[in-house]
Amino acid sequence: MQKLFNLSTLLSDQAKKYGKRAALFYRDALSKKWLPVSWNELYEKVETLAGSLIEMKVKSEEKVGIFSPNIPEAIMADFANYAVHAISVPLYATSTASQIEYIVDDSEIGIIYAGEQYQYDVACEVLKTSKTLHTVVAMSPSVDLKGIKGGISLKDFLAKGQMHPNKEAIAERRKLSSQDDLVNILYTSGTTGQPKGVMLHMYNYAEIMRTHNEILSLLNDKDTSMCFLPLTHVFERAWTYFCLQKGIAVYVNKDTAAIASIMPEVRPTVMCAVPRYWEKVYAAVQAKIESSPSLIQKLFRYSIKLGYRRNLDYKRFGKRAPLKIALPYKFIARPLFNKVKKVAGIDNGRLFPVAGARLSDEINEFLHALDIKVCYGYGLTESCATVCCYDANMKNYIIGSVGKIIPDLQVKISNEGEILLKGKTITSGYYKRPDANKEAFTEDGFFRTGDAGYLDMDNNLYITDRIKDLFKTAGGKYIAPQLLESIISDDALVEQAVAIGNERKYVSMLIVPDYTALEPWANGKGITYESRAELIKNPEVIALFEGMINTRNQGLARYEQIKRFTLLEKPFTMEQGHLTNTLKIKRKVVNELFAKEINAMYPND
């Protein structure tokens, strides 16, 4: 019988198996080189940290916070918690003091690991008034502790475990571990109201590992993974755990904004990402084509057509392309695609899971035409990540769907069109929220996702929109805003888009231009401007966006078409409250903050 996945013993098992082999890599701030952390070193540091937690009187099932960007120490802290039978509560590195205070109070956290200066300062602000928080551990050696009582460096914290290893006490705590253990409380950022703590148990992770070992059997310990989404997010968290249990070396990237330049340094074989990453890849390739000489442009476009025919019409259905497609693809298209992929650092790619938002069909098809193995899927924090995804071998996937349901997960569609879930990967509920739990589950135990969709005869799932995001025009027509936003955001000129129209006569849109594309265009046209605010009011710029919207409106029903738009100078951000920590639009907030701009698009209302 196969041993059940267990987070408390994972590192010790892997250290015995792999020893001095690299488990993690991190990018040194000074040399910019990627340095390894061996399995032995990872395990030993976790054991020392666990000893420190014992020394600090951390009890079984006590909650410990991890407030940090992606660094190896954050992973070590996670596994030290599991070693002493404590519960990890990860916190987004960009969170404010009020957000941290709410989570600390709600889950009664006593110790927080703070990654860098910002996290340390915010945590110490909470420390001043919190009834439960007593210690903030600064994980980066560059953090200024500022003499704050309760603040301690990681070096000094580790010294507690080095002086008193507590091996026997740790071993006793590990014996307490079971599949029913609550191991994480993941606070969803929420588009409205206070966040809710999603409870994930050991059995949730054990089941998601079991199913992914089955559906991702092509991956092995020769693979390398880039970790750049926040480890606080269930997608990266579950994916990193999957990689560690497979023996896949994980490159822990702290600088999310620099991912485009960092990818060619690592050239990973696997990486999970959100659609926005691939939208930027798509836009970069399109910009490269447009800036190339006419002959190169023709070669690109010919090659892309070959890619569509070979990879989408034949290869995905297990068919061999005819020689008139296969030969020019092999000798013309593939070498060209390989050069493009090498520049992006994805030339070694064997599988790229993508989820977290809608990936447009246009970009999805384009990526597959270039033979970029994007494994599109769908999941939630409450489902311990994956609900469904494309076949990992890129066979028989259906563009427009989010793939087939993973093994042994029950999915059904309610009479209202809502996707409902039941199985071992599904959360037991929200921490200390019986009211939310009553609302979240049906009488027969299915979890309400809040997403609208449908299943086809082959068990492929299709998402139409968030049920709460759907709005109705004054004419009584329901609009799926994410679909419209995705269609407009596919254009290289657009960075962000928000559809407006609830109880209005027609649909309008707030658009943040991609200034890295717009400004070179304007300069090439000889348009002079003192600021971006002036640029977006230029008649030629407005006409450019009108033409783009008119083109993209053609594929929409009349009532869905965007009648008016407003260009915005600055992007929507988390800091300004426009976005959640997972970069989802807070529609109510946007409608309130941009009421003046929105009302101007409806002069006769």
Image (tube, rainbow, N blue to C red):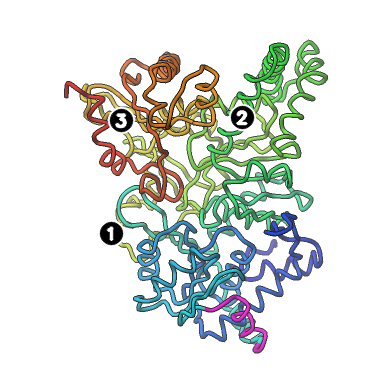
Left or right, 116 with reference to 243: left
Vertical placement of residue 424 versus 56, above or below: above
| Region of the chain picked out in magenta, as a range | 152-164
- Disc marking residue 500: 3
Indicate which label's residue lies in the foreground, 2 or 3.
Answer: 2
- Label 3 with label 1: CB-CB less than 8 Å: no
Q: Is residue 190 visible?
A: yes
**Furthest residue in direction bottom, as rendered:** 164
Q: Where residue 82 sits in the image (x, y, percent)?
A: 58, 71
Could you tell me which secondary element the residue under label 1 belongs to? helix
Q: Is residue 245 visible?
A: no
Amino acid at dot 1: Asp
Could you tell me which secondary element the residue under label 3 belongs to? strand
Mark 1 to mark 2 CA distance (whole Å) = 46 Å
Residue positioned 42% across, 45% down in the render: 573
The residue at which mark 1 appears reads as 435
- Disc marking residue 525: none
* Residue 30 located within the stretch drawn in magenta: no
Could you tell me which secondary element the residue under label 2 belongs to? helix
Image quadrant where one finds the C terminus: top left
Q: Residue 16 or 292: which is nearer the viewer?
A: 292
Mark 2 to mark 3 CA distance (whole Å) = 28 Å
- Disc marking residue 284: 2
Indicate which label's residue lies in the foreground, 1 or 2.
Answer: 2
The earlier-in-sequence mark between 1 and 2 is: 2
Amino acid at dot 2: Ala
